[in-house]
Each structure stands twice: as C-alpha cells, then as structure tokens.
Image: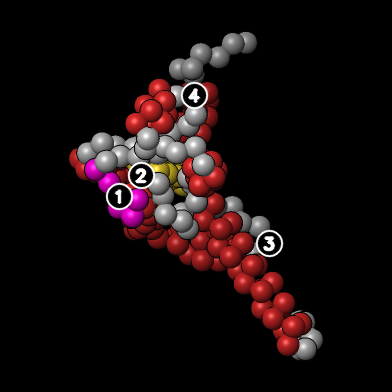
Amino acid sequence: MVHSWRSPPLRQAIASLFRSRYVATIACKRLRNVLRTYAAIVRCARMGFSTVNVNAFSPQPHTELYGQLVASGRIVLDDPYFYSLFTFQDQGRWHTSYNERFADWQLSVLVKFGVVLFLLTSFACRPWRLVQVMVEPFQRRSHSKLGKYLRAMRMDYLRTLRARRVRSGESPS
C-alpha cells in the first residue's frame, strides 16, 4: 500500500520531523533580513521546536559567491580560512563576516543573539523545558542538544577538577 504525503500518519511524521529542528543562517545583506530571520526563530520556538541551529554564513569552495570573494581578495586561501570552514558552527569563537555591512564581531553578536532569542522564547512558552534542561546534566543521558552540551561541560569540569587533585597530590574521588 502506497501512502500519499497527504495521508494523516505520513503528514504527522513529516510535521514532527520539521518541528524538531530548524537551521537559521545569518547570511543577510541588510539588518531587516536579520530581523526576518529572528522572527522565524521566534515562530519556531513558539511552535515547539526542540532546537534551532543559528550559524554564520560560510562561503564554501566551488560556489559562485566563493569564486567572487576569492577574485575580489576577500577570501585568502590560507590556514585561517580553511580552519573557518570547519568551525563556522562553533558558538565559542568569532565568526568571519563576508558581508561588507557587518564586522566579524557584529556577525558573532547577531548569531549569539539568535540562539539566546530562541532559548528565551522557548522557555517562556514552555517553562518545563527549562527544568528539563537544568536536570539533564545530572542524568545518565541527555535528550536535548542543549542538555547534551551542558552535560559535556559538567563532565569536562569534573575531569579537570580530578586532574588538578591528582597533580596536587590529593586522592581522586
């Protein structure tokens, strides 16, 4: 039996897939486009998305924009550029802006604000999620991306603490 995409079970499965994650890329030429992206992020949080990935735009090799940026000298083929290809999703570092309207620090702030906006809206609409996220680092398994991140931070902190104790001669516990 072949199901049409309009059949209720398949439609619900597709809707739940799209409800769970959303990727927002700050690749806009103007501030009004960034504000539209923020509006989409807020809608996702209100709809119940579990996570939103907010990233800075990174021109990838063999694309038209990449060719234009190399030709104009905005992209220099060196180690920092190639490293940035793998770290454009890293929220802990400054993002490289390829837009003449936004400096690197401005783009980084815009991206981080998008993440904070999603979390604040999500927790305001569903306060129990905040409790779940705060409890997850202390459980064996984390179910949300943020919970996994917080759990990993907690585990890294505990490993560092144990290593310091060993170096100072205390017995690890």
The residue closer to the viewer here, 45 or 154, is 154
Q: CA distance from mark 3 to mark 4?
A: 43 Å
Question: Is disc 1 placed on a helix, strand or loop?
Answer: loop
Residue at 51% x, 13% y: name it.
4
Question: Is disc 4 placed on a helix, strand or loop?
Answer: loop
Q: Earlier in the sequence, mark 2 or mark 1?
A: 2
Q: CA distance from mark 1 to mark 3?
A: 41 Å
Q: CA distance from mark 4 to mark 2?
A: 19 Å
- Residue 80 visible: yes
In the shown orientation, is residue 115 left or right of residue 168?
A: left
Question: Is disc 2 placed on a helix, strand or loop?
Answer: loop
Q: Which residue is mark 1?
A: 103
Q: Earlier in the sequence, mark 1 or mark 3?
A: 1
- Judged from this view, the residue extending furthest toward the left is 32
Q: CA distance from mark 2 to mark 1?
A: 6 Å
Local packing at callout 1 (Cα closer than 10 Å; few below 14, some 14-19, many 20+) is: some
Q: Which residue is mark 2?
A: 97
Q: Earlier in the sequence, mark 4 or mark 2?
A: 4
Q: Is residue 20 magenta?
A: no
- Residue 110 visible: no
Compared to residue 136, the image places residue 99 above or below, namely: above
Image coords of residue 43 (percent x, y):
32, 42
- Residue type indicated by callout 4: His
Q: CA distance from mark 2 to mark 3?
A: 39 Å
As drawn, the label of residue 62 is: 4
Residue at 42% x, 44% y: name it.
55
- Residue type indicated by callout 2: Ser
